[in-house]
Image (tube, rainbow, N blue to C red):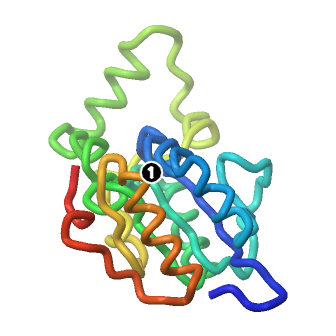
Amino acid sequence: MTTQNSKVRLATTWFGGCAGCHMSFLDLDERLIDVLGLVDIVFGPVVDIKKFPDNVDVTLIEGAVANSDHVKEAREIRRKSKIVISFGDCAVTGNVPAMRNALKIDDVLTAVYAEGPGKSPPSGELLDIMPVLLPKVLPVHQVIPVDLYLPGCPPNPDRIFAAVAALLKGEPVTLPEEMRSFG
């Protein structure tokens, strides 16, 4: 995927999740230096860029789609990225964030904002303060087309490196069977 004069434009983001996948990415340790020599990180929690850029080669999306902002961001990422990867079990299946799906969303909001500690904002102001929770938490592929699934909670650094290294070489990602498990 790299060309002689340019680096791969890599973006990462996370939606409803714990940031464990990003921590696992950082656990590439010294291999991270090799990866960073081949990519420009153009968006993500480790860089201070506020707007998702155009012309991204590869985007890793960690976390499940849980609210209206996630839907909007996922659609923008899909429009602006050549390859989108569901990064970790939450992005692939919904995993732990999707445990909320067994609950009635109105009951959750009432318990947290009306009955919980602190003063509840007036209902009209709520939309300006926070994104609207979706009725159900969704895996990324139920909102946008995904090109690659990288399971694991979090994915092992060896699995991440195998996938990213193949992409950077312009090769198809074919993980060995032991790297295709969940959890």
Callout 1 crowding tier (Cα within 10 Å): few <14, some 14–19, many ≥20: some
Q: Position of residue 29 (x, y in %)?
A: 57, 47
Q: Residue visible at 21% across and 56% down?
A: 182
Query: In this orientation, which residue lies closer to the viewer: 59 or 52?
Result: 59
The vertical placement of 7 against 154, above or below, is: below
Specify the quadrant of the image occupied by residue 129.
Answer: top right
Specify the quadrant of the image occupied by residue 13.
Answer: bottom right
Amino acid type, label 1: Asn
Q: Residue visible at 61% across and 34% down?
A: 125
Q: Position of residue 27 (x, y in %)?
A: 51, 45
Q: Where is residue 107 in the image (x, y as percent from the top left)?
A: 26, 30
Q: Is residue 49 left or right of residue 118?
A: right
Quarter placement of the N terminus: bottom right
Q: Is residue 112 left or right of residue 122?
A: left
Q: Name the residue under label 1.
A: 67
Q: Residue visible at 58% across and 75% down?
A: 58
Q: Which secondary structure, mark 1? A: strand
